[in-house]
Amino acid sequence: MYSKRTSALLVAAIFGMSSAAFAANNTGTINQDGDDNTADIQQTSSTDSNATITQTGTLNDAATTQDNVFDATANTTQTGEGNSATIDQSNSVVAMTATIDTQGDNNIDTITQDDSFNAVATILQTNVFNSDATISQVNTSDNSAATITQSNTTTDIAIIDQDNADNSTASINQDNSFVSEAEIQQVDVVGASATIDQINVSDNATAYIYQTGGTNVTASITQDSAFNSNADILQNGNDLSATIVQTNNYNDAYINQANELNTAVINQSGLGQSGNVNQAYITQLGVGDTATINQTGGAGNYASIFQAP
Protein backbone atom coordinates (compact mmCIF):
# COMPACT_ATOMS: atom_id res chain seq x y z
CA MET A 1 0.00 0.00 0.00
CA TYR A 2 1.32 3.43 -0.92
CA SER A 3 1.30 6.31 1.56
CA LYS A 4 0.11 9.73 0.46
CA ARG A 5 3.72 10.93 0.63
CA THR A 6 4.86 8.07 -1.62
CA SER A 7 2.03 8.92 -4.00
CA ALA A 8 3.24 12.51 -4.07
CA LEU A 9 6.69 11.35 -5.19
CA LEU A 10 5.16 9.10 -7.85
CA VAL A 11 3.05 11.96 -9.17
CA ALA A 12 6.11 14.20 -9.25
CA ALA A 13 7.87 11.56 -11.35
CA ILE A 14 4.88 11.24 -13.67
CA PHE A 15 4.78 15.03 -14.09
CA GLY A 16 8.43 14.91 -15.07
CA MET A 17 7.85 12.21 -17.68
CA SER A 18 4.55 13.52 -19.04
CA SER A 19 4.90 17.28 -19.19
CA ALA A 20 2.70 17.35 -22.29
CA ALA A 21 -0.25 16.23 -20.18
CA PHE A 22 0.16 19.05 -17.63
CA ALA A 23 0.51 22.78 -18.12
CA ALA A 24 3.32 24.33 -16.09
CA ASN A 25 3.67 27.71 -14.39
CA ASN A 26 0.12 28.89 -15.05
CA THR A 27 -0.76 32.38 -13.87
CA GLY A 28 -4.23 33.84 -14.14
CA THR A 29 -4.86 37.45 -13.08
CA ILE A 30 -8.06 39.49 -13.24
CA ASN A 31 -8.33 43.10 -12.06
CA GLN A 32 -11.73 44.78 -12.12
CA ASP A 33 -12.52 48.33 -11.12
CA GLY A 34 -16.10 49.08 -11.94
CA ASP A 35 -19.71 48.37 -11.17
CA ASP A 36 -21.29 44.98 -11.84
CA ASN A 37 -18.09 42.84 -11.62
CA THR A 38 -17.94 39.10 -12.29
CA ALA A 39 -14.67 37.15 -12.57
CA ASP A 40 -13.86 33.49 -13.13
CA ILE A 41 -10.54 31.63 -13.26
CA GLN A 42 -10.26 27.87 -13.90
CA GLN A 43 -7.00 25.96 -13.82
CA THR A 44 -6.82 22.19 -14.29
CA SER A 45 -4.10 19.54 -14.64
CA SER A 46 -1.24 21.92 -14.09
CA THR A 47 1.82 22.63 -11.96
CA ASP A 48 2.79 25.85 -10.12
CA SER A 49 -0.59 27.48 -10.71
CA ASN A 50 -1.42 30.97 -9.44
CA ALA A 51 -4.82 32.64 -9.64
CA THR A 52 -5.42 36.22 -8.50
CA ILE A 53 -8.68 38.17 -8.65
CA THR A 54 -8.92 41.78 -7.48
CA GLN A 55 -12.25 43.61 -7.59
CA THR A 56 -13.04 47.17 -6.56
CA GLY A 57 -16.52 48.26 -7.33
CA THR A 58 -20.08 47.39 -6.55
CA LEU A 59 -21.77 44.05 -7.01
CA ASN A 60 -18.65 41.83 -7.24
CA ASP A 61 -18.61 38.08 -7.80
CA ALA A 62 -15.43 36.00 -8.03
CA ALA A 63 -14.89 32.28 -8.56
CA THR A 64 -11.61 30.37 -8.75
CA THR A 65 -11.35 26.64 -9.48
CA GLN A 66 -8.08 24.70 -9.31
CA ASP A 67 -8.40 20.97 -9.93
CA ASN A 68 -5.71 18.31 -10.15
CA VAL A 69 -2.94 20.87 -9.74
CA PHE A 70 0.53 20.42 -8.34
CA ASP A 71 1.33 23.33 -5.96
CA ALA A 72 -1.47 25.92 -6.32
CA THR A 73 -2.13 29.39 -4.93
CA ALA A 74 -5.38 31.36 -5.19
CA ASN A 75 -5.98 34.90 -3.92
CA THR A 76 -9.16 36.97 -4.13
CA THR A 77 -9.43 40.56 -2.88
CA GLN A 78 -12.72 42.47 -2.96
CA THR A 79 -13.57 45.99 -1.86
CA GLY A 80 -17.11 47.04 -2.53
CA GLU A 81 -20.69 46.19 -1.71
CA GLY A 82 -22.21 42.95 -2.96
CA ASN A 83 -19.08 40.81 -2.47
CA SER A 84 -19.20 37.08 -3.09
CA ALA A 85 -16.04 34.99 -3.46
CA THR A 86 -15.50 31.27 -3.96
CA ILE A 87 -12.28 29.28 -4.19
CA ASP A 88 -12.42 25.54 -4.93
CA GLN A 89 -9.21 23.53 -4.80
CA SER A 90 -9.16 19.76 -5.22
CA ASN A 91 -6.94 16.73 -5.83
CA SER A 92 -3.58 18.17 -4.86
CA VAL A 93 -0.60 16.15 -3.67
CA VAL A 94 1.61 19.12 -2.82
CA ALA A 95 0.78 22.53 -1.37
CA MET A 96 -2.52 24.38 -1.75
CA THR A 97 -3.02 27.90 -0.45
CA ALA A 98 -6.23 29.94 -0.69
CA THR A 99 -6.90 33.47 0.61
CA ILE A 100 -10.02 35.64 0.39
CA ASP A 101 -9.89 39.22 1.69
CA THR A 102 -13.12 41.24 1.51
CA GLN A 103 -14.43 44.59 2.72
CA GLY A 104 -18.03 45.63 2.29
CA ASP A 105 -21.53 44.40 3.07
CA ASN A 106 -23.36 41.11 2.46
CA ASN A 107 -20.19 39.08 1.94
CA ILE A 108 -20.48 35.38 1.22
CA ASP A 109 -16.99 33.88 1.10
CA THR A 110 -16.28 30.18 0.69
CA ILE A 111 -13.09 28.17 0.40
CA THR A 112 -13.29 24.44 -0.31
CA GLN A 113 -10.20 22.25 -0.31
CA ASP A 114 -11.00 18.65 -1.19
CA ASP A 115 -8.47 15.82 -0.91
CA SER A 116 -5.68 18.37 -0.73
CA PHE A 117 -2.26 17.65 0.71
CA ASN A 118 -0.71 20.43 2.83
CA ALA A 119 -3.70 22.79 2.50
CA VAL A 120 -3.86 26.30 3.98
CA ALA A 121 -6.97 28.51 3.81
CA THR A 122 -7.60 32.05 5.08
CA ILE A 123 -10.67 34.31 4.92
CA LEU A 124 -10.47 37.93 6.10
CA GLN A 125 -13.61 40.09 6.39
CA THR A 126 -13.37 43.69 7.62
CA ASN A 127 -16.01 46.38 8.24
CA VAL A 128 -18.80 44.19 6.97
CA PHE A 129 -22.48 43.65 7.65
CA ASN A 130 -24.45 40.42 7.31
CA SER A 131 -21.49 38.29 6.19
CA ASP A 132 -20.80 34.56 5.94
CA ALA A 133 -17.40 32.89 5.82
CA THR A 134 -16.94 29.15 5.33
CA ILE A 135 -13.82 27.03 5.01
CA SER A 136 -14.21 23.33 4.22
CA GLN A 137 -11.18 21.06 4.16
CA VAL A 138 -12.67 17.67 3.46
CA ASN A 139 -11.61 14.09 2.79
CA THR A 140 -7.87 13.66 3.33
CA SER A 141 -6.73 17.12 4.41
CA ASP A 142 -3.27 16.07 5.71
CA ASN A 143 -1.38 19.05 7.20
CA SER A 144 -4.46 21.26 7.16
CA ALA A 145 -4.72 24.74 8.62
CA ALA A 146 -7.64 27.16 8.38
CA THR A 147 -8.24 30.71 9.60
CA ILE A 148 -11.22 33.07 9.48
CA THR A 149 -10.92 36.62 10.79
CA GLN A 150 -13.94 38.92 10.97
CA SER A 151 -13.43 42.46 12.32
CA ASN A 152 -15.94 45.25 12.97
CA THR A 153 -18.87 43.22 11.74
CA THR A 154 -22.55 42.70 12.51
CA THR A 155 -24.63 39.52 12.12
CA ASP A 156 -21.72 37.51 10.76
CA ILE A 157 -21.29 33.73 10.60
CA ALA A 158 -18.00 31.85 10.47
CA ILE A 159 -17.71 28.09 9.91
CA ILE A 160 -14.65 25.87 9.60
CA ASP A 161 -15.24 22.25 8.68
CA GLN A 162 -12.29 19.87 8.67
CA ASP A 163 -13.15 16.30 7.78
CA ASN A 164 -10.39 13.70 8.18
CA ALA A 165 -8.20 16.57 9.38
CA ASP A 166 -4.82 14.83 10.02
CA ASN A 167 -2.46 17.39 11.58
CA SER A 168 -5.30 19.92 11.70
CA THR A 169 -5.58 23.31 13.52
CA ALA A 170 -8.40 25.75 12.82
CA SER A 171 -8.99 29.24 14.12
CA ILE A 172 -11.80 31.78 14.07
CA ASN A 173 -11.38 35.30 15.36
CA GLN A 174 -14.38 37.62 15.58
CA ASP A 175 -13.31 41.00 16.88
CA ASN A 176 -15.83 43.69 17.75
CA SER A 177 -18.49 41.56 16.13
CA PHE A 178 -22.10 41.98 17.18
CA VAL A 179 -24.51 39.01 16.88
CA SER A 180 -21.80 36.60 15.75
CA GLU A 181 -21.82 32.84 15.24
CA ALA A 182 -18.68 30.73 15.06
CA GLU A 183 -18.44 26.99 14.55
CA ILE A 184 -15.51 24.61 14.13
CA GLN A 185 -15.90 20.93 13.29
CA GLN A 186 -12.90 18.63 13.16
CA VAL A 187 -14.20 15.15 12.52
CA ASP A 188 -11.83 12.13 12.50
CA VAL A 189 -8.79 14.28 13.43
CA VAL A 190 -5.24 13.38 14.50
CA GLY A 191 -3.30 16.45 15.70
CA ALA A 192 -6.33 18.75 15.88
CA SER A 193 -6.56 21.98 17.95
CA ALA A 194 -9.23 24.69 17.36
CA THR A 195 -9.62 28.19 18.71
CA ILE A 196 -12.50 30.63 18.62
CA ASP A 197 -12.03 34.20 19.87
CA GLN A 198 -15.00 36.52 20.14
CA ILE A 199 -13.57 39.62 21.77
CA ASN A 200 -14.34 43.25 22.55
CA VAL A 201 -18.01 43.92 21.77
CA SER A 202 -19.08 40.35 21.07
CA ASP A 203 -22.66 40.60 22.30
CA ASN A 204 -25.15 37.86 21.44
CA ALA A 205 -22.27 35.68 20.27
CA THR A 206 -22.38 31.91 19.89
CA ALA A 207 -19.33 29.65 19.71
CA TYR A 208 -19.28 25.90 19.08
CA ILE A 209 -16.37 23.45 18.74
CA TYR A 210 -16.96 19.82 17.83
CA GLN A 211 -14.00 17.43 17.82
CA THR A 212 -14.40 13.69 17.42
CA GLY A 213 -12.22 10.74 16.44
CA GLY A 214 -9.01 11.00 18.38
CA THR A 215 -5.41 11.65 19.38
CA ASN A 216 -4.20 14.94 20.76
CA VAL A 217 -7.24 17.22 20.34
CA THR A 218 -7.39 20.57 22.26
CA ALA A 219 -9.98 23.32 22.01
CA SER A 220 -10.41 26.82 23.35
CA ILE A 221 -13.14 29.45 23.25
CA THR A 222 -12.74 33.00 24.54
CA GLN A 223 -15.66 35.43 24.69
CA ASP A 224 -14.79 38.85 26.03
CA SER A 225 -17.45 41.50 26.68
CA ALA A 226 -19.90 38.79 25.84
CA PHE A 227 -23.39 40.03 26.60
CA ASN A 228 -25.90 37.18 26.21
CA SER A 229 -23.26 34.86 24.68
CA ASN A 230 -22.74 31.11 25.02
CA ALA A 231 -20.14 28.50 24.16
CA ASP A 232 -20.04 24.70 23.79
CA ILE A 233 -17.16 22.26 23.34
CA LEU A 234 -17.65 18.56 22.53
CA GLN A 235 -14.65 16.24 22.44
CA ASN A 236 -14.67 12.52 21.82
CA GLY A 237 -11.37 10.76 22.41
CA ASN A 238 -7.69 10.51 23.43
CA ASP A 239 -5.56 13.18 25.12
CA LEU A 240 -8.18 15.98 25.02
CA SER A 241 -8.16 19.31 26.93
CA ALA A 242 -10.65 22.20 26.54
CA THR A 243 -10.96 25.72 27.87
CA ILE A 244 -13.81 28.22 27.80
CA VAL A 245 -13.30 31.73 29.17
CA GLN A 246 -16.25 34.13 29.30
CA THR A 247 -16.31 37.51 31.00
CA ASN A 248 -19.26 39.63 32.07
CA ASN A 249 -23.00 39.39 31.65
CA TYR A 250 -25.25 36.42 31.14
CA ASN A 251 -22.65 33.67 30.51
CA ASP A 252 -23.38 30.04 29.68
CA ALA A 253 -20.88 27.30 28.86
CA TYR A 254 -20.77 23.54 28.35
CA ILE A 255 -17.88 21.08 27.90
CA ASN A 256 -18.36 17.39 27.15
CA GLN A 257 -15.33 15.10 27.08
CA ALA A 258 -15.32 11.40 26.40
CA ASN A 259 -12.57 8.93 27.11
CA GLU A 260 -8.90 9.35 27.90
CA LEU A 261 -6.65 11.80 29.67
CA ASN A 262 -9.16 14.70 29.78
CA THR A 263 -8.84 18.14 31.54
CA ALA A 264 -11.42 20.88 31.11
CA VAL A 265 -11.64 24.42 32.46
CA ILE A 266 -14.54 26.87 32.35
CA ASN A 267 -14.04 30.42 33.60
CA GLN A 268 -16.96 32.78 33.86
CA SER A 269 -16.70 36.20 35.30
CA GLY A 270 -20.21 36.96 36.15
CA LEU A 271 -22.85 39.62 36.41
CA GLY A 272 -25.49 37.47 34.68
CA GLN A 273 -29.21 38.37 34.70
CA SER A 274 -32.18 38.48 32.34
CA GLY A 275 -33.44 35.29 33.87
CA ASN A 276 -30.36 35.26 36.10
CA VAL A 277 -28.20 32.97 33.94
CA ASN A 278 -24.42 32.26 34.52
CA GLN A 279 -24.35 28.38 34.65
CA ALA A 280 -21.51 26.10 33.50
CA TYR A 281 -21.44 22.35 32.88
CA ILE A 282 -18.61 19.85 32.47
CA THR A 283 -19.13 16.19 31.65
CA GLN A 284 -16.15 13.80 31.58
CA LEU A 285 -16.48 10.14 30.79
CA GLY A 286 -13.43 8.58 32.30
CA VAL A 287 -9.67 7.93 32.60
CA GLY A 288 -7.53 11.04 33.43
CA ASP A 289 -10.29 13.51 34.25
CA THR A 290 -9.79 16.87 36.11
CA ALA A 291 -12.27 19.70 35.79
CA THR A 292 -12.36 23.28 37.01
CA ILE A 293 -15.20 25.78 37.01
CA ASN A 294 -14.70 29.33 38.32
CA GLN A 295 -17.62 31.73 38.53
CA THR A 296 -17.36 35.20 40.02
CA GLY A 297 -19.26 38.45 40.00
CA GLY A 298 -22.90 37.81 40.70
CA ALA A 299 -26.33 36.76 39.38
CA GLY A 300 -27.77 33.26 38.97
CA ASN A 301 -24.63 31.07 39.07
CA TYR A 302 -24.88 27.30 38.79
CA ALA A 303 -22.09 24.88 38.12
CA SER A 304 -22.15 21.15 37.45
CA ILE A 305 -19.32 18.63 37.02
CA PHE A 306 -20.15 15.05 36.13
CA GLN A 307 -17.34 12.50 36.01
CA ALA A 308 -17.98 8.87 35.15
CA PRO A 309 -15.48 6.04 35.74
Image (tube, rainbow, N blue to C red):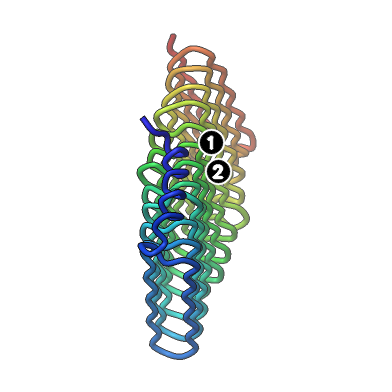
Image quadrant holding the N terminus, namely top left
For the residue marked with disc 1, what is the amino acid?
Answer: Ala
Q: Which mark is residue 219?
A: 1
Q: Secondary structure at mark 2?
A: strand
Name which quarter of the figure residue 35 lies in. Answer: bottom left
Q: Position of residue 86 (x, y in %)?
A: 39, 66
Q: Is residue 95 toward the left or the right of residue 84 in the image?
A: right
Q: Position of residue 171 (x, y in %)?
A: 54, 48
Q: How many marks?
A: 2
Q: Secondary structure at mark 1?
A: loop
Name which quarter of the figure residue 23 lies in. Answer: bottom left
Q: Is residue 35 toward the left or the right of residue 196 in the image?
A: left
Q: Residue furthest top?
A: 309
For the residue marked with disc 2, what is the amino acid?
Answer: Thr
Q: Residue at x 40, y 31 (%)?
A: 212
Q: Which mark is residue 1?
A: none
Q: Earlier in the sequence, mark 2 or mark 1?
A: 2
Name which quarter of the figure residue 221 lies in. Answer: top right
Q: Which mark is residue 195?
A: 2
Residue nearer the viewer, 256 or 276: 256
**10 Å crowding of disc 1: few (<14), some (14-19), many (20+):** many
Q: Position of residue 224 (x, y in %)?
A: 61, 49
Residue nearer the viewer, 256 or 25: 25
Marks 2/1 in contact by CB < 8 Å: the verdict is: yes
Location of residue 11 with respect to 269 vertically, above or below: below
**10 Å crowding of disc 2: few (<14), some (14-19), many (20+):** many
Can you see residue 178?
A: no
Residue nearer the viewer, 270 or 127: 127
Distance of label 2 from label 1 (alpha carbons): 6 Å
Q: Position of residue 158 (x, y in %)?
A: 45, 55
Location of residue 197 with respect to 215 vertically, above or below: below
Can you see residue 249?
A: yes
